[in-house]
Amino acid sequence: MVPRILHAAFLGGTVLVLGILVVLRRTAPPVGGPDTDSLRYALLGLGGLVVFGFRAIRARIEPPAGPGDEAAWWRANLGLVIVSSALADSLALAAGVVYYLSADPVALGVAAVGLALLLVARPTRPIGG
């Protein structure tokens, strides 16, 4: 139950903040802004690192031994699942901030990648293997 609540909080909070940033950008854009190209390249570099880290962490999670003790499996792996979700969340939120600052559509694509990673990390999906 706790993993589902945490996942819902990660996903819901990220979608809410991204929505607010997109609406803010359209209604009250920031005055002056940083160089769009440098932000884009920094965000793409961060995206690559996060995807690599996400896959590396998820690869360390062993699949459940059997249908028996799911609670013990979650106790053993909850930390790794939370860290992988936090990585995906941070990528989506960083991309949202970059979109707010620069209105670069690439940032929205990177935010979509972060949200997709969060969806892949949902607790009802089989892990490992």
Image (cartoon, helix red, strand yellow):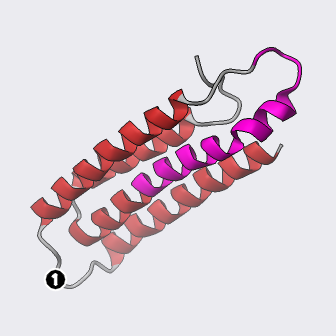
Seen at 47% across and 62% down, the residue is: 19
- Magenta region: which residues? 65-92
> Circle 1 — which element?
loop
Residue 113 in view: no
**48 on left or right of 128:** left
- Packing grade of label 1 (10 A; few <14, some 14-19, many >=20) is few
Q: Quadrant where the N terminus lies?
A: top right
Relative height, residue 23 to residue 127 (above, below): below
Q: Which residue is mark 1?
A: 32
Q: Give coordinates of residue 61: x percent, y percent.
A: 61, 30
Seen at 13% across and 62% down, the residue is: 38
Seen at 84% across and 33% down, the residue is: 72
| Residue type highlighted by circle 1 | Gly
Seen at 78% across and 31% down, the residue is: 73
Q: Give coordinates of residue 50: x percent, y percent.
A: 38, 46
Residue 55 in view: yes
